[in-house]
Image (tube, helix red, strand yellow):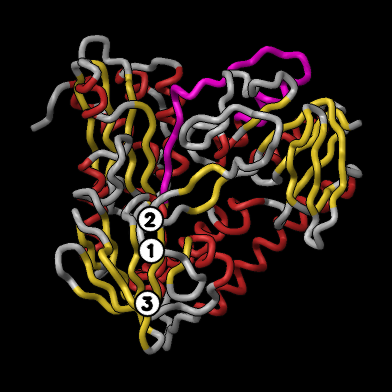
Amino acid sequence: MYDLIILGMGPGGFEATLTALRKKLSIAIVEKNKIGGNCLNRACIPTKYFWTGAHQIEKLSVLKDYGIEIQNTSINFQRAWEGKEKAITFLRKSLNMLLKTKKVPVYKGTGRIVGQNEVEVIKEDGSKELIKGKNILIATGSIPVSVGNIVPDGKFVITTEDLLERTDSLPEEIIIVGGGVAGCELGYILSAYGTKVHIIELMDRLLPMPDISEEVSRYLLRKFKKMKINTYFKTTLESYEIKDNRVFAKLSDGTQLTADKILLSIGRKPNTDIDSIGIEKDQKGFIKVNKKMQTNFKNIYACGDVVNSPMLAYIASYEAKIAVDNITGKSIEADYSIIPYVLFSGYEIATVGLNEKQAKDKGIEVVTGYYPYTYNEKAVDEHESEGFVRLVFEKESRKILGGTIVGTGASELIHIIQMAVKTEMTAEDLHNFIYFHPSLSEIFVYATYDIVAGKLF
């Protein structure tokens, strides 16, 4: 009888493991695929690895300005793939070593909850093994969704998982269905490495989500146009056929495209077909939990993509810690009020709190502070002067409500805004903080100048 059985060893399962081991719980892990889950093997980590490569490709053109002259440069995607595999293998081995050192049993197979304290492990050969635990944490993640008549076959019509885990050769031309986060990240990466990219989006802009402002969408679109990435808005993939090892596609606006592959990038659904005891789920298949991450069974918890919270690796980790803390006697509730959202596309794009439209929709009168990277000395030194920061403040109190950063370092800088929102800092607080010079962080000084000291122009 284990203290805790963890179903799934992605970000949620890993964080639960770290927390549980520190609290001296006896644990067992059930994982049917590779340790590390989707994030490490097929999403976050390989994407950021390839993004770094794509960004370096862009930087090649400015090396001469630093006195670095390189002749006969070439792009070898196969080498990039091997480098990605090396990085992921190292991280996966580190996780396995921790589990081995701490003598944590890993049951390979699909876990199914068959009793309030019982998990049946269905192994690859079809055999079954029953294990028991005082508590169970469901962290089985999500899987890609398909749409209409577009059915992934792993060769011509692929998912993001197919692309990042099994496609080690670069397609010459690709049609990406979906202009959301994954579509924009992978579209940029593939284009930088030399693929001709077409992005089809049902809505009227890239990144059509409330947390991303239209200002950001327009800024990214300009970059995509420079890269010759083709975008089709208010459009769907009406039909396609495979002929002579090529995809022939027809769009709803009548456009006809040919490509090597179609990449489905329209979202994911929870992987919650994991029990036979009546764990409650909503209409979309998400497991219902309270703020302690507890299901309708008091000793069974869930975290990550299987619950109806933002489908983000770090949210899974956050929820896993809350679950284990509650298992061990603390009373902690999840708080999703201040979550940073980050993506890596033509630029790093990060946002937290409310943007201008969201604030106005809530009836809040706001003032905003803006500053472009163009005039930041550190950004200019690094040939990274594309980008901007937009800060949103409540007009009367001047308390910060949120902010958006587009440009180099945005994924790190966003935490300054996150802490500012959490501690209810004002424009004056941000402005009068002493920042190192030259630093990217100085964008906050200049983004608040007009509000604090008055307009210069």
Q: Position of residue 436 (x, y in %)?
A: 43, 36
Q: Marks 1 and 3: CB-CB under 8 Å?
A: no
User: Which residue is labeled 1 in the image?
Assistant: 150
Image position of 114 with respect to 109: above or below: above
Q: Position of residue 145 (x, y in %)?
A: 46, 53
Q: Residue furthest top?
A: 397
Q: Which residues are magenta?
A: 319-343
- Residue 83 lies in what quarter of the image? bottom right
352, 202: nearer the viewer? 202
Tag 3: amino acid: Gly
Numbered disc 2: secondary structure: loop
- Residue 16 lies in what quarter of the image? top right
Numbered disc 1: secondary structure: loop
Q: Position of residue 175 (x, y in %)?
A: 33, 69
Q: Marks 2 and 1: CB-CB under 8 Å?
A: yes
Mark drawn on residue 147: 2
Q: Is residue 66 visible?
A: no
Numbered disc 3: secondary structure: loop
Nearest to N terminus: mark 1 or mark 3: 1
Nearest to N terminus: mark 2 or mark 3: 2
Work out how far the residue at label 2 is from the one at label 3, CA to CA, in angstroms: 28 Å
